Image (cartoon, rainbow, N blue to C red):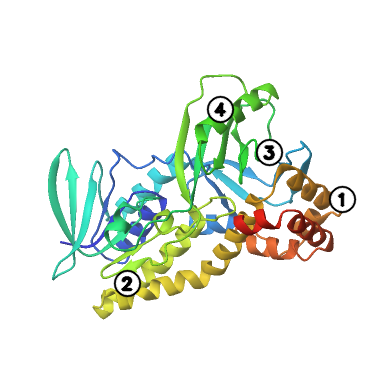
Amino acid sequence: MYDIIVIGAGITGSFTARELAKLGYQVCTLDKHPSAGNKSSCTGIVSSECMELLPVDDSIIQQKAHSARIFSPAGNFIRIERDSTQAYILDRPKLDMWMAAQAQACGAEFRFNTFVESIDQSKEGVIVTCQHNRRHFDLEAGVAIIASGFSGRLTGKLGLGQISYYARGAQSEVTCLDIDETEVYCGNELAPGFFAWLVPTGGSRAKAGLLCRSNPHKYMASFLSRLVRLGKIFPAEFSISYGNIPLQPLSRTYGNRFVVIGDAAGQAKPTTGGGIYFGLLAAREAITVLDDAFKERDLTARYLSRYQKRWRQILGHELSIDYWAHRFYQSLDDRQISHIFDLIERHGIHESFLTSPDISFDWHSKIITEAIKHRSLQRALKEFHLKSPERLKHKT
């Protein structure tokens, strides 16, 4: 019988397993894949703040970024730049493998090719029913941590429901031409309600991808064709990876003897879909609460509800503001998006953000709330609202 079973060997699950193993707990991590490192649809962009939580080996860092160009649907762009490194582009499969190895070195056990069928309560803890090579078996633990990525299968069985509002992500490794900084493309023809990206990873390699609500294959094929026409990437037979990204958190992320963390809990930014940093912040709170719960010998839902209170204190306001900003952006057409770009460039709004020490790569609510205070943007938003009140009301 283990103290803790972690379901999912992604970055959040392995980080949690490592930290709990360091505290002396017997930890077993289960994953349905043959090994760690299967998140190829993630771009792997993290902030300097995140790197403080994640001091990775240099071989995992593909590129350091301090600037980016953001293109409007009309083809104009805004360039943002700071002197210091603002983001790190990591090799996501290597990152997951590195963290799993770190956890194993600290004493956590890992079982791959192991599919978790259900989690049930027992007198002593939880029973996790698994399948490995067509063989069914049970494992017991004091508590289970669900870190299995975006999927409502286990949370649905446990009565927590499922996340119904999510984005579809698509990404491909490409060979690029003279791309030395990240490029972001906005527009409903490219990625309706979201954006597309071209992120250099060193040498002539880059990651091209996008987010959308449906038909990711269709939009990704169109985006890659566009990049080829623009002479930004070489034509090739592109291998495309797909993944789902939650845009709202679960209403409850705990129960008797279990907690949910990371993408499984919906702890990702609705503005960008980034989930590494927020998942790690929530995992850190889960580790603290579980450690206290074991010491108090109280793993009931009532005690573990402290985890949700703690992570919501850190992320709740941010996720809420980001969500409504995303829904508003989703309601705009390409003409309106281009108009906002023009206003930002004309009035130097982006430059004022760059000089502000309060503006962060991760915490977008400050950018959003400061932007909507600007008079020119307020006038534009009122104009949009008057011209299409029913559509905006429906969308937001």
User: Depth-wise, is mark 1 or mark 2 nearer the camera?
Assistant: 1
Identify the residue under disc 1.
346
Q: Residue at x 61, y 49 (%)?
A: 87
Q: Nearer the viewer, residue 322 or 50?
A: 322
Left or right of 122? Residue 219 is right
Quarter of the image holding residue 367?
bottom right
Q: Residues within 10 Å of mark 4 (few under 14, many from 20)?
A: some
| Helix, strand or loop at mark 2 | helix
Separation of disc 1 and disc 2 at Cα?
53 Å
Q: Residue at x 34, y 47 (%)?
A: 101
Q: Earlier in the sequence, mark 1 or mark 2?
A: 2
Label of residue 181 in the image: 3
Separation of disc 4 and disc 1 at Cα?
33 Å
Residue 335 x, y percent position in the rendering: 76, 43
Identify the residue under disc 4.
221
Label of residue 291 in the image: 2
Separation of disc 2 and disc 3 at Cα?
42 Å
